[in-house]
Image (cartoon, rainbow, N blue to C red):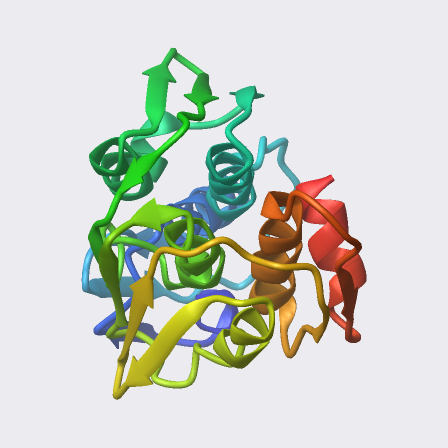
Amino acid sequence: MLAATRAKGSTIIENAAKEPEIIDVATLLNSMGASIKGAGTETIRIEGVSELKGCRHSIIPDRIQAGTYMIAAAATRGDVLIDNVIPKHLEALTAKLLEMGVGIEELDESIRVIGKPSYNHVDVKALVYPGFPTDLQSPMTSVLTQATGVSVLSDFVYSNRFKHVPELVRMGAKIRVEGRSAIIEGSALNAAKVKASDLRAGAALVIAGLTVSEGVTEVTGSNILTAVMIIW
């Protein structure tokens, strides 16, 4: 979209992402003088313009960051009010947390997450928006280790999103990967030294460490600082 906005002629993007962030970028560019139609659908049409102008724009809240907070609150059985969010953007995650038995209260621009002593197992499929976000698949794995029974978490967006699983297994998690799915049996986790392979894995391992009742969990890796900043 950024390139097509200044390119000569018409550009059509097919099989486009539908995430709210796409709509937000298109809204910004249109406010700057671009001509973008169809953002939020599978087909985006862009008419190139010769120049853009300045504007004032408020960026939408980060739903992945908010979702990470929600999962961390549930995993630690906390009572957390997450402010400055758009609840509609988090509907897929909210639905799964409710299915697990997590207490959720939605307000206009905030979500309250109330942890419970025990959780039900659920099956989760990461899909394109408005489905469950693939970026929250890794943190969700951690909270599913705290559920009673066996959960199945499948990712149909990215096939190589289970690098955090071996590290969770080092912490005592009972997880096996079969193709695009991880089969997760609820179990208590132990403190261990683990390594984050990417940002989302880092968030998952930090959340897992927060659920451990005794000992010190050490998470290393180049992505861990950002993951800690997100959760902190």
- Which of the two residues, 90 or 195, is positioned nearer the viewer here? 195
- Residue plotted at (26% across, 81% down): 180
| Left or right of 127 in this view: 90 | right
Q: Position of residue 54 (x, y in %)?
A: 66, 41
Q: Position of residue 152 (x, y in %)?
A: 23, 65
- Residue plotted at (27% across, 55% down): 129
| Left or right of 124 in this view: 119 | right
Which picture quadrant has residue 119?
Answer: top left
Residue 126 visible in the shown view: no
- Which of the two residues, 189 or 6, is positioned nearer the viewer here? 189
| Left or right of 24 in this view: 101 | left
Q: Position of residue 126 (x, y in %)?
A: 27, 63
Q: Position of residue 144 (x, y in %)?
A: 37, 53
Q: Is residue 16 above or below residue 158?
A: above
| Left or right of 157 in this view: 107 | right
Residue 35 visible in the shown view: yes
Identify the image quadrant of the C terminus.
Answer: top right
Which picture quadrant has residue 118?
Answer: top left
Which picture quadrant has residue 182?
Answer: bottom left
- Which of the two residues, 33 or 65, is positioned nearer the viewer here? 65
Identify the image quadrant of the N terminus.
Answer: bottom left
Q: Is residue 14 above or below residue 101?
A: below
- Which of the two residues, 49 or 220, is positioned nearer the viewer here? 220
- Residue plotted at (24% across, 49% down): 121
